[in-house]
C-alpha cells in the first residue's frame, strides 16, 4: 500500500518535469526571431592562390513565408565572372521554404592576369519585398614557387669493386604544387645506377607539395672484375616540371687482387707414370685491380703422392700479369692405374684465392709387360730345345 | 757330343722339321669343319650367343644413359634368367677345345693311319704341330665368326657403330679367348698322346677342366690355411693371407681368363685383388682406364695363358716324339 503511494508520487514528479521542459522549448522557439529572408555563407572572407578555382557555398533561409528568391551579384571587380549553381546547373533564383535552408553554389572566375590583392563584392538575395545582402571579401595570393632540393646524407662512399654503393637521398618539394619528379643519373660507363624507393626500382616519383621523400641511389659496377681502382663521380638529377636539382656523389673504389689458376693451354688433365716425377706447368694470373702479395701454392693430393712447386711462393703479382709455375707431380710408387684428382690452389696474403682441379691419369710401368713377353719367350725356348733334342723323327 | 750322336743315329733326317706342316693343317681343319661334333658345338655356341646378346640388348635399350662402351656391354650384360655371354664362354670354350683335340693322336693310332701318314715325307714334329694349329685355327675361326655375329647384331640392334677403342678391346678379348681355348686344346693333345683310348683322353681332359672349375677354389682355401695357419692378427697378416689366396687361385686358367675378361670388357676396373682405401684416395672411381693401361693390367693373365698353351704343347711334343708308334 505504501509502496503504491510512493510510485504514484514518482509518476507525478516525472509528468511535472516533462511539462516543464516542454514549456521551456516553446519559449525558446518563440524568442528566436528569424529575419524574413537571410543569405549566408560559412566563410565570407577567404584566401585563394592565383589560378585556383573559387567556389563558395551559399545558404538561403526564410523566416515564415515560402517565396521565390532572386540572386544577384553586385560590385563584382572588372573582368571577373560569377555564376550561381544549383544541382550543377546555372540558376538565378531559388525557392525557399521556412525551416529549410536552400543551398546554392557561387562560382567565381577571376581573369587570367589576376594580381594579388583583396577583392570585395556582394551577393544580394531578393524575395517578396525582402532583401538580404552578403558581403564577400576574397584575398588572392601569389603561390609559393615550385622548388626542388636533393640532399645526400653521405655523398662519398668507399668500397671494393663488387660493393653496392648505396646513397641515401632526400628529395624535398618546398613549393605549393605537387610534382612528378623524374630521376636521371650520369655515371661512368662502368657503373649501373638505379633509384629505389621502398625497395622498388623507380624512375619517376610523385612528390606532394611541401613534403619530402627518401630514396636510395644504388651504384653497382657492371663487371666487378674489370673495375679499376679509383674515384668515380655519379651525378644524380631530379626534374619535376620546370624545376630541377642535381647532386654529385662519389664512389671510391679500392682495388682487390683476383687470382686465376690454369695451365698455358687451359687443359686441366694430364698423365703421369706411377713413381716418377712429371712436370705440370701452371699459370697464376692476377685479373684484379690491385697487386696480389705473397701467393702461396698448395696442392691437395692422394696420400703418398708428392707435389712440389717451383717457385712455391710468388712475392708480388701486379694486376694483369701472369706467371708460370712448374709443379712436379709424383704419384705413389705403387699407385693403381687410372684417373686421380689433384686440387691445386693459390692463395694470396690479402685473401684472394683460386683453386683448380687437375685430373691425372696414372699409368703404370711397362716393365711387367716385358716380363710377360719374357715368359712367352721362355716357353718358346723350351719348345725350341725340345725340337733340337727330339726333332725330326 | 749330343749332336754327333744324333747325326750318327739318324741317317737322312735333314731339312726343316716343319715340312708338310701346312698340308696337315689344311687336312685336319677340313676334317674338323665337316665333322658332326663340330656342327653340334657350333650350333650350341651360336644359339647361346644369339640368346644372350639379344637379352643383353633388351637390357641396354631399357637403360637410359650414355655409356661410351655400349658394345662391351653386349658381352657382359646379363638378363635373368640368362647369364651373360662371357659366363657361357667360360665353359663352352674349354668344351669346344677338348672336343677338337681329345682324339688327335690316339684317333690316328686307332684307325691305324698314323704309320701311313708318317710314311709320307712328313716328320712327327709337323704332324703334331699341324694338328695343334688346325685345332687352334678352327677355334679362332669359330670364335671370330661369333664375334662378328655379335658385333653385327649390336650394330643392327643398337643402331650405332662400335668405337675404335671398343673394337680394340673386343679384338684383344678374342685373342685372350683363343688362347684360353688353346690351353685346353694343348691339354687334350697331351692326354690324347698319353692315352691310347680316345674316351679315356676325353674323360681325363674333362676331369682336369672340372677340377679347375669346381674344386680348385675349395683346394685353394684349404691350401692357404695349411700354408699360413692361425687366424690373422695384424692387417699385414690378413693382407698376406689374401695375397696368397689370390696367387693360388690364379694357377687356374679359368681364373686367369675371367680376370682378363673383366679387365678388358669393363674399362673402369683398375686392379684385381685387395685395394687399400689409402690407395684409392683422390681416385675418380668409375672413370675408364685407357686401353693400354687395361691391357697392361691383364697382360700377366694373357701372357700366362699363352705360356701355358706353349708349355703344354711342348709336353705333348716331347711325349709324342718319344713314343713308339710302329705298333
Image: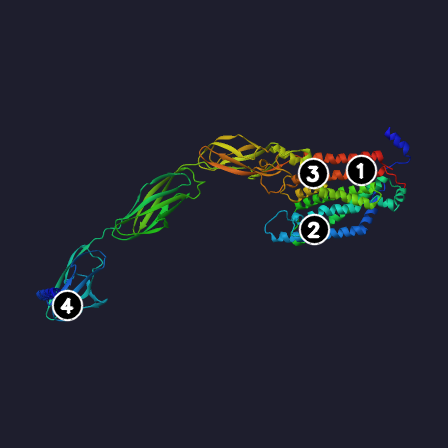
Above-or-below relation of A385 to B154:
above
What's the distance in space between the residues labelled 3 and 4, CA to CA?
128 Å
Foreground: B256 or A184?
B256
Q: Position of residue B101 (x, y in %)?
A: 80, 45
Query: In the image, is residue A90 above or below residue B83?
Result: below
Q: Which residue is mark 1?
A: B315
Q: Are dots 3 and 2 on a single chain?
A: yes
Q: Chain of mark 2?
A: B
The chain under label 4 reads: A
Q: Which residue is mark 4?
A: A99
Q: Position of residue A7 (x, y in %)?
A: 12, 65
Residue B150's mark?
Answer: 2
Residue A57, compared with residue B322, is above or below; it is below
> In the rendered structure, which disc, 2 or 1, sits on the residue that comes first in sequence?
2
In the rendered image, which quarter is residue B104 located in? top right
Q: Are marks 3 and 4 in contact (CB under 8 Å)?
A: no
Q: In front: B208, or A7?
A: A7
Labels 4 and 1 within one chain: no
What mark, if any, has residue B220 been given in the picture?
A: 3
Quarter placement of the N terminus of chain B: top right
State the mark number for residue A337. none
Circle 2 residues within 10 Å: few <14, some 14–19, many ≥20 = many
B287 sits to left or right of A319: right
Mark 4–mark 1 contact, CB under 8 Å?
Answer: no
**Which chain does the numbered disc 1 sit on?**
B
Q: Residues within 10 Å of mark 1 (few under 14, many from 20)?
A: some
Q: Is residue B323 left or right of residue B275?
A: right
Mark 3 vs mark 1, foreground winner is 3
Amino acid at each position: 500500500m505504501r509502496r503504491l503511494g510512493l510510485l504514484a508520487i514518482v509518476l507525478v514528479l516525472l509528468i511535472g518535469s516533462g511539462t516543464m521542459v516542454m514549456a521551456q522549448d516553446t519559449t525558446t522557439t518563440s524568442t528566436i526571431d528569424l529575419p524574413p529572408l537571410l543569405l549566408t555563407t560559412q566563410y565570407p572572407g577567404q584566401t585563394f592562390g592565383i589560378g585556383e578555382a573559387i567556389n563558395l557555398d551559399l545558404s538561403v533561409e526564410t523566416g515564415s513565408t515560402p517565396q521565390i528568391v532572386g540572386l544577384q551579384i553586385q560590385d563584382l571587380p572588372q573582368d571577373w565572372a560569377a555564376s550561381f549553381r544549383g544541382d550543377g546547373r546555372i540558376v538565378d533564383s531559388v525557392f525557399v521554404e521556412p525551416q529549410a535552408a536552400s543551398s546554392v553554389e557561387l562560382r567565381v572566375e577571376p581573369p587570367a592576369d589576376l594580381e594579388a590583392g583583396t577583392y570585395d563584392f556582394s551577393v544580394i538575395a531578393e524575395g517578396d519585398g525582402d532583401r538580404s545582402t552578403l558581403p564577400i571579401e576574397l584575398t588572392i595570393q601569389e603561390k609559393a614557387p615550385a622548388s626542388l632540393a636533393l640532399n645526400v646524407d653521405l655523398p662519398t662512399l668507399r668500397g671494393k669493386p663488387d660493393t653496392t654503393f648505396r646513397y641515401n637521398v632526400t628529395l624535398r618539394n618546398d613549393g605549393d604544387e605537387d610534382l612528378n619528379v623524374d630521376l636521371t643519373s650520369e655515371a661512368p660507363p662502368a657503373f649501373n645506377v638505379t633509384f629505389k624507393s621502398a625497395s622498388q626500382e623507380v624512375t619517376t616519383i610523385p612528390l606532394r607539395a611541401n613534403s619530402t621523400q627518401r630514396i636510395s641511389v644504388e651504384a653497382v659496377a657492371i663487371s666487378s672484375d674489370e673495375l679499376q681502382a679509383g674515384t668515380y663521380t655519379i651525378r644524380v638529377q631530379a626534374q619535376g616540371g620546370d624545376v630541377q636539382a642535381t647532386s654529385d656523389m662519389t664512389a671510391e673504389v679500392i682495388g682487390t687482387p683476383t687470382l686465376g689458376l690454369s695451365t698455358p693451354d687451359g687443359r686441366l688433365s694430364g698423365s703421369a707414370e706411377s713413381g716418377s716425377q712429371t712436370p705440370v706447368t701452371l699459370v697464376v694470373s692476377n685479373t684484379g685491380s690491385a697487386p696480389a702479395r705473397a701467393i702461396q701454392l698448395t696442392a691437395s693430393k692422394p696420400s703418398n703422392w708428392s707435389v712440389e712447386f717451383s717457385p712455391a711462393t710468388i712475392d708480388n703479382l701486379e694486376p694483369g700479369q701472369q706467371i708460370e709455375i712448374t709443379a712436379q707431380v709424383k704419384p705413389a710408387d705403387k699407385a693403381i692405374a687410372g684417373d686421380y684428382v689433384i686440387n691445386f690452389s693459390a692463395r694470396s696474403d690479402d685473401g684472394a684465392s683460386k683453386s683448380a682441379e687437375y685430373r691425372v691419369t696414372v699409368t703404370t710401368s711397362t716393365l711387367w709387360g716385358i716380363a710377360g713377353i719374357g715368359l712367352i719367350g721362355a716357353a718358346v725356348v723350351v719348345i725350341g730345345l725340345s725340337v733340337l733334342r727330339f726333332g725330326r723323327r | 757330343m749330343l749332336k754327333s750322336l744324333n747325326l750318327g743315329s739318324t741317317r737322312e733326317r735333314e731339312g726343316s722339321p716343319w715340312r708338310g706342316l701346312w698340308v696337315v693343317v689344311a687336312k685336319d681343319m677340313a676334317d674338323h669343319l665337316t665333322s658332326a661334333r663340330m656342327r653340334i658345338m657350333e650350333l650350341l655356341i651360336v644359339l647361346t650367343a644369339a640368346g644372350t646378346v639379344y637379352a643383353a640388348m633388351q637390357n641396354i635399350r631399357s637403360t637410359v644413359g650414355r655409356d661410351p662402351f655400349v658394345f662391351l656391354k653386349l658381352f657382359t650384360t646379363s638378363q635373368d634368367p640368362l647369364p651373360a655371354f662371357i659366363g657361357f664362354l667360360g665353359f663352352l670354350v674349354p668344351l669346344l677345345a677338348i672336343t677338337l683335340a681329345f682324339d688327335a693322336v690316339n684317333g690316328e693310332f686307332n684307325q691305324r693311319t698314323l704309320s701311313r701318314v708318317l710314311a709320307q715325307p712328313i716328320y712327327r714334329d709337323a704332324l703334331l704341330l699341324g694338328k695343334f694349329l688346325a685345332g687352334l685355327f678352327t677355334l679362332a675361326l669359330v670364335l671370330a665368326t661369333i664375334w662378328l655375329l655379335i658385333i653385327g647384331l649390336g650394330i643392327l640392334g643398337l643402331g650405332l657403330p662400335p668405337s675404335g677403342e671398343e673394337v680394340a678391346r673386343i679384338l684383344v678379348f678374342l685373342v685372350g679367348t683363343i688362347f684360353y681355348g688353346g690351353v685346353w686344346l694343348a691339354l687334350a693333345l697331351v692326354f690324347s698322346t698319353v692315352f691310347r683310348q680316345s674316351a679315356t683322353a676325353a674323360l681325363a681332359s674333362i676331369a682336369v677342366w672340372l677340377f679347375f672349375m669346381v674344386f680348385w677354389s675349395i683346394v685353394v682355401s684349404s691350401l692357404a690355411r695349411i700354408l699360413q695357419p692361425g687366424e690373422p692378427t695384424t692387417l699385414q697378416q690378413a693382407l698376406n693371407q689374401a695375397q696368397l689366396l689370390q696367387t693360388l687361385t690364379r694357377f687356374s686358367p679359368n681364373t686367369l681368363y675371367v680376370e682378363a675378361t673383366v679387365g678388358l670388357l669393363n674399362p673402369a676396373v683398375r686392379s684385381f685383388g685387395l685395394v687399400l682405401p689409402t690407395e684409392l684416395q683422390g681416385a675418380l672411381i668409375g672413370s675408364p682406364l685407357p686401353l693400354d693401361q687395361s691391357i697392361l693390367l691383364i697382360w700377366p693373365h694373357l701372357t700366362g695363358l699363352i705360356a701355358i698353351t706353349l708349355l703344354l704343347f711342348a709336353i705333348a711334343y716331347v711325349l709324342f716324339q718319344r713314343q713308339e708308334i710302329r705298333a
